[in-house]
Amino acid sequence: MVDFGGWDMPVEYSGLIAEHMAVRTGVGLFDVSHMGDIQLRGPESLDAIQHICMNDASKLQVGQAQYSAMLYPQGTFVDDVIVHKLSDNDYLIVINAGTREKDFGWVKSNAQKFHCHVSDYSDYYTQLAIQGPKAAETLQKLTNVDLSTIKFYWFKWGTVCGLPNTLIARTGYTGEDGFEIYVPSDEVTSKRVWEEVLEAGKEFGIVPCGLGARNTLRLESALSLYGHEISETINVFEAGLDRFCKLEKGPFIGSEALQRVLAEGGPTRKLVGLEMVDRGIARDGYGVFNESATQVGSVVSGSPAPFLKKNIALAFIPRDYTALDRQLFVQVRNSMVKAKMVPIPFYRRPKKQS
Amino acid sequence: MSYPANYRYTREHEWIEVDGKTGKIGITDYAQNSLGDIVFVESPKVGAAVTKGEIFGSVESVKAVSDLYSPVTGTVTEVNDELASSPEKINTAAHDSWIMKVELSDPTEIDSLMSAEDYEKFIAEETGH
């Protein structure tokens, strides 16, 4: 068990590679209760969200979710979040564990000038993620909601494992199809649901998955992790999250700084995908070098990719380099190991055949 | 998991099985279990000199890289090539998966290493059980 933002969480259950492969080819179950849940309610809750988050929440319909982020005035990240529109004037923001207190404080103080109420519901819910191509078939056995009617990044309320009004969202952090469900956090209920999901997924080879597989799955899919691809010193354009940032929606926290970055010609560094050409595994913090052995950047996430069977990394390098098909090297301990730039995400799930 | 009584162990979780002047060296079951799925073993070259307590290579799992420390001083006489293509053998049989063989310069160095019994006590303390 490791301490993760104050939570005791297993890095792996049966083994990281087996867990990773189960999610890519069948189904895996994650306890992601460490994620925080902040609710904003009131006549100006949308205005507050629009002010605090970079994506355009006015486009959301009831039952829809969107990837977004909260920014500092300098255009860097407080955290990335998923905004759910529960009903008019009622929104749920799902945040990360490591940044939970900071996030709640940030939302609360910045929502103050709006007519809305901010509540931290994190301790009320156990959040379980059922992920993989067999996730829908697994969860369908346990709910009265026709899951085929929930599109990706939408959610519905229904009975799950006999629990009425359970939020079922078609979201996740693995690059696969999947669902995240929010059940009451008392131990008896949480444990019962956990076991019922495992039973329902048995025929598909379901396995419980830990933080290790969660990390390698999100890395193959090039999904950001706070403290790595996004942080208080990395801005939206550097992180390559432009498409979730809607400057045209009007001013919000961080928008002025981002306009300035654009006016000055764009970001000076970019997040890129690297694949190791020669033997060697890039790890977080390793230096990226050019042919003349000058350091040009660093790896923010690096690992063997269990499904792709390659050694991959995400790294920040100067923008001038990103346009060029230039030879790069990662310093793996004492040796320079050849790497090449590749498009991200490294992995994209196959389109459904139906 | 039982730790072979005829092996000696280091605090860095290597084992050595000595036969005359030659020692076979690998990592313990405790080490493989902490590392998880092993994907890469970096072994020294045959003929390389290794020194007791110093790094001779590394072993990498999906989640971490870990240095390997030589339990003894000597010269590498053989490396286990099978681990280049099947590093996961260490996960399934850590105590049978030797990484290198070393000709010992000073066989008495072995006396300062832990016995199986001492090593088991040592890891029990490390894990707090």
Image (cartoon, rainbow, N blue to C red):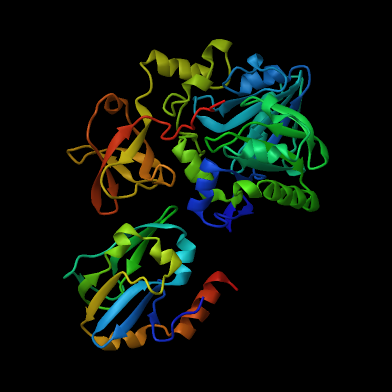
**Vertical arrangement, residue A60 with respect to residue A110, above or below:** above
A99 with respect to B9 (left or right): right
Please tell me in which quadrant of the rendered image residue A67 appears. Answer: top right
Q: Is residue A237 left or right of residue A108?
A: left
How many numbered discs, if any?
0
Q: Residue at x 52, y 20 (%)?
A: A245
In the rendered image, is residue A228 in sight? no
Q: Nearer the viewer, residue B129 or A192?
A: A192
Q: Nearer the viewer, residue A3 or A19?
A: A19
In the displayed structure image, the side of residue A32 where residue A305 appears, left or right: left
Q: Position of residue A117 (x, y in %)?
A: 77, 26
Q: Find residue A61 and report its horizontal and vertical position in percent.
A: 69, 17
Residue at horizontal 35%, vertical 60%? B86
Seen from the viewer's position, the closer of residues A266 and B47 is: B47
Residue B2 location (% of width, % of height): 50, 79
**Identity of the residue drawn at 35% across and 85% down:** B112
